[in-house]
Image (cartoon, rainbow, N blue to C red):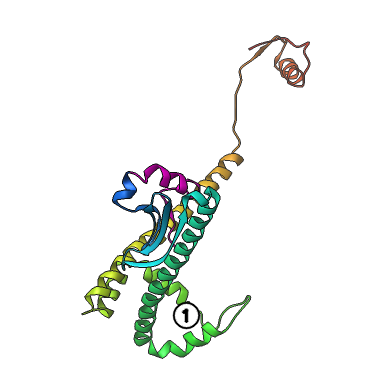
Amino acid sequence: MGRTFHYIQNDDVLKSFKEFKDSVLRERAVVIARHGDYSLFLLYLSDDELGLKLENTEKHKVIQERSYKVSETTDALVSRGVRHACQKMSELSDEDVNRKRLQIWKWYVLDWQKENAEKTKELLEKGLVWLDDGESPYEEVMDIETYLHGAYLNLGSTIALIEKHLAGNEKHLEQFKKFAISDIMEMTSQDTRDRSLAEAENAKQLDDMKKHTYQFTVSVEATDKEHARQALLSYLAGDDRIKVQK
């Protein structure tokens, strides 16, 4: 899933309108936030009216619009409206991602079934059985989730799959290729971040457990080696009668 990029924080939207209504906003709408193919815009409607517009910029389709009378509203009300619009934008974007990703996975499954027709029954039975523990009777049949995850994250394979199934459909071909590149890069970067965090945490724990050896050189006055050892032990135990040279 993608994340929402905020260019104007929710609590600052009304203040930003008042600041830019006589300059930038007269010329164009200003982007408040983006998420995937969706953008939330701040618009100038009049000196006393601001507008919010949620749009799918890829399809040039307006999803929803609303306006506020500047003289009759508050920062809190506008902020709440912006927050709701951002939530809607995030939900729509995630829904689009899931639909496109699922379609590519369907192509993978269909191709796999064609190539492994003799294992279709085993795959179906394995998918229907829930085992809390114990060995599956179909260990040789790869989990479909494992297969899909590994295959999908191979960018070259996925692009080839898209080109195969959308040959002749130039509009959707480019749309799916662009989506797959963005989605796979985000998924793999997330995997890398998670792995790096786990490795860093593990390294920290190992470092915390490491025992360090420190050596100090001191001199004690004694008649022999054993006497010196006993004197040093007494000193380390807190006997301040023992004199040492550090």
In this figure, which residue is indicated by the disc labeled 1? 140
| Nearer to me, 226 or 210 | 210
Would residue 111 be found to the left or right of residue 225 on screen? left
Name the image quarter holding residue 63.
bottom left
State the extent of the magenta-drawn residues as a range: 1-22
Horizontal and vertical percent position of residue 29: 34, 53
Would residue 209 be found to the left or right of residue 191 on screen? right
Q: Residue at x 34, y 62 (%)?
A: 182
Name the image quarter holding residue 174.
bottom left
Horizontal and vertical percent position of residue 224: 71, 13
Q: Residue at x 41, y 74 (%)?
A: 99
Provide the secondary structure element on which disc 1 rests.
loop
Horizontal and vertical percent position of residue 90: 46, 62
Horizontal and vertical percent position of residue 220: 69, 11
In reply to whether residue 14 is colored magenta, the answer given is: yes
What type is the residue that disc 1 sits on?
A: Glu
| Nearer to me, 49 or 86 | 49
| Nearer to me, 201 or 62 | 62
Q: Please rate how many residues cluster around mark 1, counting C-alpha atoms within 10 Å: few if below 14, some from 14 to 19, many from 20.
A: few
In reply to whether residue 156 is colored magenta, the answer given is: no
